[in-house]
């Protein structure tokens, strides 16, 4: 039968509503039973797990299918809407960034109280940092904490070759902020926020940027505006004073690397004792997304090999390989 520790983990993960850990532990129990020769029971258990996962996926799809209910058809071509299912606890962040975001969320949760005292909650954030450090995920986590949707602005659809059309589209987006409270994410913001004296099409970029500056300055909605960029040095200087908070996302240090690996492998058991400090040294220089992806690839290897234990050697090999690729780039 399943080990006592596995049963305790199963029950605890259910109580904590930790879906990933619950299913991972259930699969480990099925694998253990199969190795002990209880093949019929193991197969039945796997079928139940697969069925539960399918039902859960359908529920998630239904929850994500947030009706746009937007008044203008043009706006639906500019915005992608979805309901995130993550929150701040799902992220491993620098302490200063975490504290700042916690204050923003607290002010947003009590925005009506602040406005009753003629005070405005912070809601305009500029996030900078290397790719894969958690900027986009932050927008999702804030929305998840507040129980509102994320509206991702399609910047490729915003920019138009026709004079004045880009500005009209931008105006539509800012109008929507009043009608639909959400987190509005301008990802790769440098594509419209670059300095007004740079680029080939200086005239159009300058007009769009000037329009953004005017709109964000005038905006009095209850929506959260987040601009994210990997190239803060290219942004026009006039932008910075328009934001309530400017947060720079660093690459994870050794402590955060350990936290990331533990968070994303906690539902599993390694085949040998883990020296997390050693892993952190190997992973130094990798971004958050790369480390998470490597953890998931290690888990995949375990599942595909029909094992119930994670191989430490696999994790180390993947970390080393990723670092080697980064050094060549």
Image (cartoon, grey):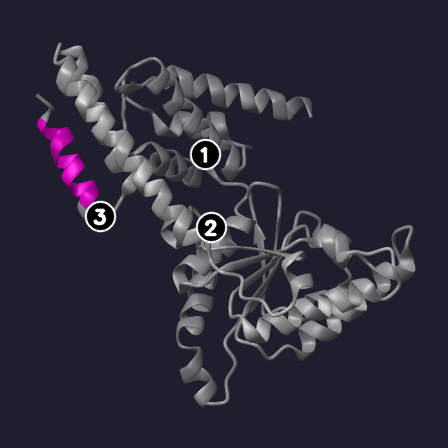
**Taking 133 as reference, is 329 above or below it?**
above
Using a 10 Å C-alpha cutoff, classify the residue at mark 3 as few (fewer than 14 neighbours), some (14 to 19) or many (20 or more).
few
**Taking 83 as reference, is 309 above or below it?**
above
Q: Which mark is residue 231?
A: none
Which residue has dot 1 on it?
A: 292
Q: Position of residue 115 (x, y in %)?
A: 47, 85
Q: Is residue 196 visible?
A: no
| Front in this rendered view, residue 234 or 55 | 55
Tell me whether the residue at label 1 lies in contact with that at label 2, contact meaning CB atoms closer than 8 angstroms: no
Secondary structure under tag 2 reads: loop
Using a 10 Å C-alpha cutoff, classify the residue at mark 2 as few (fewer than 14 neighbours), some (14 to 19) or many (20 or more).
some
Which residue has dot 2 on it?
A: 94
Q: Which residue is depicted at the point 44% across and 89% down?
A: 116
In the picture, residue 103 is in which quadrant?
Answer: bottom left
Q: Position of residue 183 (x, y in %)?
A: 53, 63
Q: Position of residue 221 (x, y in %)?
A: 57, 77
Secondary structure under tag 3 reads: loop
Left or right: 49 in relation to 243: left
Tell me whether the residue at label 1 lies in contact with that at label 3, contact meaning CB atoms closer than 8 angstroms: no
Q: Nearer the viewer, mark 1 or mark 3?
A: 3
Q: Which mark is residue 16?
A: 3
Using a 10 Å C-alpha cutoff, classify the residue at mark 1 as few (fewer than 14 neighbours), some (14 to 19) or many (20 or more).
some
Left or right: 317 in relation to 264: right
Q: Nearer the viewer, mark 1 or mark 2?
A: 1
Q: CA distance from mark 1 to mark 2?
A: 16 Å
Left or right: 167 in relation to 268: right
Left or right: 325 in relation to 209: left
Q: CA distance from mark 1 to mark 3?
A: 21 Å
Q: Which numbered disc, 1 or 2, marks the residue that appears first in the sequence?
A: 2
């Amino acid at each position: 039968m399943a080990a006592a520790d596995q049963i305790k983990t199963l029950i605890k993960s259910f109580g904590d509503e930790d879906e990933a850990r619950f299913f991972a532990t259930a699969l480990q129990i099925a694998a253990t039973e199969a190795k002990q020769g209880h093949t019929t029971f193991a197969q039945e258990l796997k079928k139940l797990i697969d069925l539960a996962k399918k039902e859960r996926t359908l529920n998630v799809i239904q929850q994500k299918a947030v009706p746009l209910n937007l008044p203008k058809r043009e706006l639906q071509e500019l915005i992608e809407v979805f309901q995130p299912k993550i929150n701040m606890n799902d992220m491993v962040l620098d302490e200063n960034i975490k504290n700042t975001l916690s204050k923003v969320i607290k002010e947003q949760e009590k925005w009506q109280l602040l406005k009753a005292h003629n005070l405005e909650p912070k809601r305009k954030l500029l996030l900078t940092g290397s790719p894969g450090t958690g900027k986009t995920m932050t927008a999702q986590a804030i929305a998840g904490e507040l129980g509102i949707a994320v509206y991702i602005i399609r910047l490729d659809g915003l920019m138009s070759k026709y004079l004045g059309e880009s500005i009209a589209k931008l105006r539509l987006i800012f109008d929507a902020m009043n009608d639909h409270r959400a987190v509005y994410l301008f990802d790769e913001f440098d594509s419209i926020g670059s300095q007004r004296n740079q680029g080939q099409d200086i005239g159009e970029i300058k007009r769009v940027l000037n329009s953004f500056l005017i709109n964000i300055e005038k905006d009095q909605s209850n929506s959260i505006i987040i601009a994210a960029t990997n190239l803060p040095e290219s942004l026009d200087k006039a932008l910075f004073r328009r934001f309530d908070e400017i947060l720079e996302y660093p690459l994870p240090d050794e402590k955060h690397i350990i936290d990331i690996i533990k968070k994303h492998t906690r539902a599993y058991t390694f085949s040998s004792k883990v020296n997390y400090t050693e892993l952190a040294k190997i992973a130094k220089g990798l971004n958050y997304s790369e480390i998470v992806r490597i953890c998931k690839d290690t888990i995949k290897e375990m599942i595909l090999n029909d094992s119930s234990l994670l191989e430490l050697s696999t994790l180390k090999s993947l970390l080393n390989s990723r670092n080697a690729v980064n050094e060549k780039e």
